[in-house]
Image: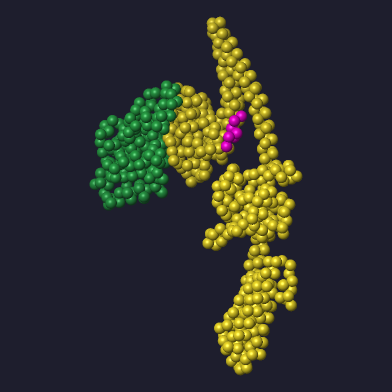
Chain colours: A green, B yellow
Amino acid sequence: MIEKDGIVTSKKTEAEISHDTLRRMGNQPDAEICVRELKRDEFSAADKIWLEYHDTTGDPASDRVFAVFSSNRIVSLARCRRHTDGMDVDGIFTPAEHRKKGYSRIAVGALVEACHNDDLYMHAVRHLIDFYKKEGFITIEEKELPQTIRERYVWAGGNLEGAEVQPMYRKAGLFS
Amino acid sequence: MKIIQLLNLSSPFIRTRALTLAVATIIALGVNIVGIFSGITILLSHVIYIPIILAGYWFPRRGLLFSTFIAVAYGVLIALIIPLDLLLIISTLFRMAFFILIGGVVSFLSVKLRASEQQLHEIIEFLPYPTFAVNRKGFVIAWNQAVEELTGVKKAEILNKGDYAYSHAFYGIKRPALLDIILTPNPETEALYPHMKKEGKKIVSEIFIPRFKGGKGVHLRIAATALVDERGNITGAIESIRDITEQVMTESALQNTSSRLNTIAGIVRHDISRKLAGLYGILSIGVMKFDNPEVLFFIEALKDSAQGIQIQVDISREFKDIGTSPPAWIPVQDAVLDAVWRLGVGGVSFRTWTERLEIFADPHLTAVFFHIFDATIKETEQVTTVVVTYHIRDSGCAILVETDGAGFDNKIKESLLSQREERYGHGLFLAHEICAISDMTIKETGTPTKGTRFEIMIPPEGYRIL
């Protein structure tokens, strides 16, 4: 069972896991629970899940989307979108029926590890600030966001608190 | 006199033009004579521009002279047939001046055009590689010295000839050539060039022609590309040929030598492995036979040494194979997972985030990851986690293999990817060599005490995101 890691669980070692299982967990969602990045032709599956989440859709040219699978079904998603001036983490969504099982943490953990070579920015929902802090994010001022990412919430007119969101930032790096 | 000279020219092409010009001149003057008698002197005089323009375009060096001649002829006709008054004289002189001016301008532009064409022809003519060109109808419009030497067919024999005359010069039969695929795309023609591939705007292929060089045959690399006009319409095609016989023979000789060396090395490897198996057997019996701790320690040390020799044998097997198969698009995730499986170490967590990444690399890419993992885990301490990711940069794509643990000491980092002392093995050097085959670079950029970090840099054209 994977808790957080992309391929090998923190409990099982590589030596305990067969090659075929490694392959399956890496490439095919037929392990009970696994997390992996979606390929271009799988974005439509994520778009269906996101219908409930502001009706957003993924763009294979600029997005990296990480999905947690349970019994071959997507149960949680996290997206990282490349802008001209920074990487924006958004689209973190778990359908209501799959919540309270830790899937979001698996998806976000995968995204953070896979995209750790870049500084990451996000607009976090305020009650999830502590959740993202555990993944290495810190809170920042709105003006510290790259312009194109800041423009996503331009409709809030500078009152992000009123919009219940908090700009956050994670410095690039892995084992630090 | 000039016209008579032109008519006497031997080239049928020029003779046809000269006759056409003579007929056009007679008709133009005849029409004007009729016009003068009928009182239509202004409108019909424009007919005279036709032979003037034709002469200027076809015979630019004589165009001005011809236009002067025809202007004078026109003036004489007016003077002989119509009673002259001042207005008629002035208008006739103006018309004559215009005839001469138009003839001069057309001749001047034609001379410039011919000079430009001549320059282009000379470039083709003196290209070191055999080159020829055909127009849209398949008639040969250029045939340079190098192609004359290769085929033995002179330019004068083949210029302006169609019906696959150029193919006959090469293949001994009239059939479509590589450039015909550009002019008239056809699967049957493509089947004649099974190794054909597209490189940008040109198509290239390699062929062997047995009849050249006194029946010894030559290997040729052919490149064909379209000739287009300013609107992008195909007006013809050009084919350039390079004799690669020497290169093919060298490659063949190298392959034979390499094959023999590999056979010998394989026999030696097999013998060493057999002897090692025997040694392992003896050492295992020794462990059972002796219980003296000093002897057992000694046996264990011998086993380690034997293990080291076996690793060297395995690596030499990989060295034998690298570069023998052409590079291909390889899913990085598969290569990493194969390496993890092959490594067979416990206690280390591997995580790889390269599902969407494919790179154009030697098929032994798995060995690159294997030796990075192997060296990192065996030569550094406290590694519990290995993470593989990728990062898109302006200069291409970097694959990053990072671990926790102690990392490499600065002293070791410098020589990490070169051939090091025997006790370290040659794994990372092998990884470096495999990367170099497809212009990839590899370096270690980790911070000592904070883990290792290998960066494999792939050029922009060498990766794709699925």
Q: Is residue B321 magenta?
A: yes
Residue B413 location in percent, x, y? 54, 32
Residue B323 location in percent, x, y? 59, 34
Q: Nearer the viewer, residue B107 or B177?
A: B177
Q: Quadrant of the N terminus of chain B?
A: bottom right
Examine the rendered structure and indicate whether residue A30 appears above or below residue B51: above
**Corner quadrant of residue B37:** bottom right
Residue at left 73%, top 56%?
B154
Q: Nearer the viewer, residue B340 or B86?
A: B86
Q: Nearer the viewer, residue B56 or A135?
A: B56
User: Does B219 sit left or right of A52 as displayed?
Assistant: right
Q: Which residues are magenta?
A: B320-326
Q: Give the main secondary structure of the magenta stretch.
A: loop
Residue found at the very far right of the displayed protein: B214
Residue B341 location in percent, x, y? 47, 26
Q: Is residue B101 magenta?
A: no
Q: Is residue B441 visible?
A: no
Residue at left 42%, top 23%?
A17
Residue at left 63%, top 76%?
B24
Q: Nearer the viewer, residue A159 or B239?
A: B239
